Amino acid sequence: METGKEMNYSAGSFQPIIEKCDGCERVVSEEGSTYCKTYTNPAAKWRLGICNFATHAKPEINVVKVRINPLKAAKRASSSRRG
Ligand code: SF4
């Protein structure tokens, strides 16, 4: 069985990386082009948001924390019930 380290990216179905992949450790260069050694189609990987294999960018969890003051919420709930 072959365990060849050398991948022939340019001959395979690997698509060149996109701008956003710049700086990622998974980028490999071959014959003047750059490929991702994890993903054959980096553009598709980024289409839905951040690439989850990116080593240079971490997905920020942009959960907007809506802080509800529990006391106020309780008051509001009880006062609306009164009417
Ligand atoms: S792992 Fe993701 S960010 Fe890194 S080169 Fe591949 S597609 Fe681009």
Image (cartoon, rainbow, N blue to C red):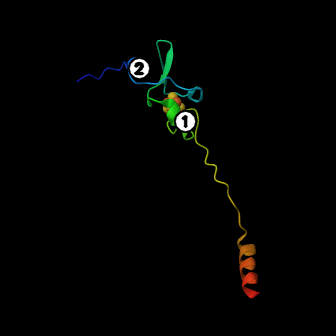
First in sequence: mark 1 vs mark 2: 2
Q: Is the shortest distance between ligand 1 and the CB of mark 1 under 8 Å?
A: yes
The residue at the point 64 percent across, 53 percent down is: 63
Q: Is residue 76 above or below residue 6?
A: below
Q: CA distance from mark 1 to mark 2?
A: 19 Å
Q: Residue furthest top?
A: 31
Label 1 with label 2: CB-CB less than 8 Å:
no
Identify the residue position indicated by label 1 in the image. 46
| Residue 7 image point, x, y percent | 37, 20
Q: Amino acid at mark 2?
A: Tyr
Residue at image x 58%, y 39%? 58
Q: Residue at x 47, y 24 (%)?
A: 15
> What residue is pinned by disc 2?
9
In the foreground, 35 or 41: 41
Dot 2 crowding, Cα within 10 Å, few <14, some 14–19, many 20+ = many
Give SS at disc 1.
helix
Q: 46 and 57: which one is in front?
A: 46
Q: Secondary structure at mark 2?
A: loop
